[in-house]
């Protein structure tokens, strides 16, 4: 229990808690914002009321996640001033301004037009409303751009130099376009989109399994599936490119990701560890299953690597990552979920081509619907696992190779950090329960298919009337509407 008296360790634990919890909510808003743009655009193009009701139903999840994202994001950023003030003083010339861009360019844009998107259906011109929905989605995804730019700079600092303990920016655009920036932004963008698609598909599959609005939710499932055809393989490919960058720019992190203790010289075959039990103290793996020569093919698509794969033993213990088992398995969980999503997408496409996902047949695909329900939370696990690899694997550096984590922490009593960490744990546990309650309430109620369509008088029928199978069922839970 020595860590309870170490303010740096407690500050790292607190930031890990707040960051991983916060990450759960914007993941859905950034991806679902794009989905809302799609369904509202189809509604305006076709005037098919199904897509209007989809926009209204899924926007409830958007606002729920937006609210919790704001409530958890602000305290997380405050920690740069409370727990990590020496880092902020050293890197604020660049890092602080980029975080400011996220607040002013992204969050303010999203917040400014969110009210119009939610409540402006009958109050503004349809084109104005659609533009508002687009701007909300743009704002949400600009957050991804600036947050990943800031974090990528911490991974591969560029555009300046450290002078007397402070980072002096010489080329602002080179700092923004640091080596990790492009792939990191793309990898996170597709992660949020993929997570959102499988959440939408999973919830839709739940309704289909329970025979509620089957035809209605078969549409949202197929929209998610159609997008996943492109997103799932692209995410795997961009993830591979990110791994190649780690190989070249952060060799100690790669060694931790692969639990590789000894160096494989350039020009030799590098084995890939499939499963292992890393032992930090003994500096070896107590047990492992390896695939001969596979790491060379994974990193460069050839057996013998151009550069050596350095093992952890090349660095002094204080200069390399620890918690190797956490990094190692978080990396494999992320990869496993990515390939599971791709496999589920392929099976679903096959069934779609066979005509098994039509409104008449989809209820018979119970095994497939259960797989989609199972997949719904996996994207969150993959995203948090990826951030564990990204940030724990960067240690002992807060700015890789330049500023150590211990030198970036504030000089505050450990008891103060322990008190705030306990408070965050309690409050976030309450918030999590609240989200589960309100989210399940939205799902239990289902879509309101009796809302008047914009531009029509209350007693005027729509041009494309809602089919009979879309009429809300008469189960008791629907009476709440």
Image: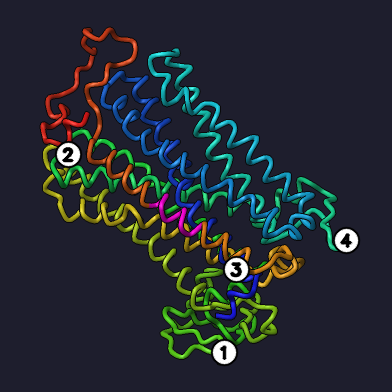
Count neighbours of disc 3 (C-alpha within 10 A) and say few if under 14, some if 14 to 19, many if 20 or more: many
Work out how far the residue at label 1 is from the one at label 3, CA to CA, in angstroms: 22 Å
The part of the chain drawn in magenta is 424-432
232 left or right of 160?
A: left
Residue 48, image quadrant: top left
Could you tell me which secondary element the residue under label 3 belongs to?
helix
Residue located beneath label 1 in the image: 281
| Residue 303 in picture, x, y percent from top left | 53, 77
Q: How far apart in space, not on screen, are marks 4 and 1 (Cα)?
A: 36 Å
Q: Which residue is mark 3?
A: 10
- The residue identified by callout 4 is 163
Residue farthest along the right direction in this orientation = 164
In this view, 111 is above or below 397: above
- Disc 3 and disc 2: Cα gap in Å? 53 Å
Mark 4 or mark 3: which is in front?
A: 3
- What residue do we see at 62% from left, 71% from top? 9
């Amino acid at each position: 229990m020595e860590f309870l008296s170490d303010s740096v360790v407690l500050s790292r634990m607190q930031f890990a808690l707040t960051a991983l919890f916060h990450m759960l909510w914007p993941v859905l808003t950034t991806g679902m914002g794009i989905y809302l743009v799609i369904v509202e655009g189809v509604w305006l193009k076709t005037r098919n009321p199904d897509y209007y009701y989809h926009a209204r139903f899924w926007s409830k999840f958007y606002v729920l996640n937006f609210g919790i994202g704001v409530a958890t994001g602000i305290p997380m950023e405050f920690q740069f001033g409370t727990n990590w003030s020496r880092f902020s003083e050293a890197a604020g010339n660049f890092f602080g301004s980029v975080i400011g861009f996220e607040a002013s360019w992204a969050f303010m844009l999203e917040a400014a037009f969110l009210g119009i998107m939610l409540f402006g259906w009958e109050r503004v011109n349809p084109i104005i409303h659609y533009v508002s929905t687009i701007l909300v989605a743009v704002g949400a995804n600009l957050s991804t751009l600036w947050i990943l730019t800031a974090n990528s700079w911490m991974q591969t600092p560029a555009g300046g130099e450290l002078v007397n303990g402070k980072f002096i920016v010489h080329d602002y655009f080179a700092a923004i376009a640091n080596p990790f920036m492009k792939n990191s932004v793309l990898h996170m963008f597709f992660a949020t989109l993929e997570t959102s698609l499988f959440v939408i598909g999973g919830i839709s599959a739940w309704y289909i399994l329970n025979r509620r609005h089957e035809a209605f939710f078969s549409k949202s499932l197929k929209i998610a599936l159609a997008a996943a055809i492109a997103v799932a393989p692209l995410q795997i490919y961009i993830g591979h490119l990110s791994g190649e960058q780690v190989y070249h720019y952060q060799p100690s992190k790669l060694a931790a990701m692969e639990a590789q203790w000894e160096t494989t010289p350039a020009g030799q075959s590098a084995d890939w560890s499939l499963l292992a039990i890393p032992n930090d103290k003994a500096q070896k793996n107590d047990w492992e299953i390896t695939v001969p020569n596979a790491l060379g093919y994974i990193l460069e698509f050839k057996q013998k690597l151009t550069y050596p794969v350095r093992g952890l033993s090349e660095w002094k213990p204080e200069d390399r990552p620890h918690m190797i088992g956490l990094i190692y398995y978080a990396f494999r969980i992320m990869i496993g979920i990515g390939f599971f999503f791709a496999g589920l997408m392929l099976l679903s496409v096959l069934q779609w081509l066979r005509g098994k996902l039509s409104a008449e047949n989809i209820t018979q695909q119970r095994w497939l619907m259960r797989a989609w329900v199972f997949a719904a939370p996996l994207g969150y696990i993959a995203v948090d696992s990826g951030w564990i690899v990204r940030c724990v694997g960067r240690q002992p550096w807060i700015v890789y190779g330049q500023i150590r984590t211990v030198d970036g922490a504030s000089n505050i009593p450990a008891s103060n950090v322990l008190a705030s960490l306990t408070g965050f744990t309690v409050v976030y546990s309450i918030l999590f329960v609240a989200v589960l309650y309100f989210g399940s309430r939205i799902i239990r109620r289902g879509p309101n298919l009796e809302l008047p369509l914009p531009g029509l008088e209350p007693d005027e029928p729509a041009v494309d009337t809602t089919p009979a199978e879309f009429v809300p069922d008469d189960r008791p839970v629907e009476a709440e509407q």
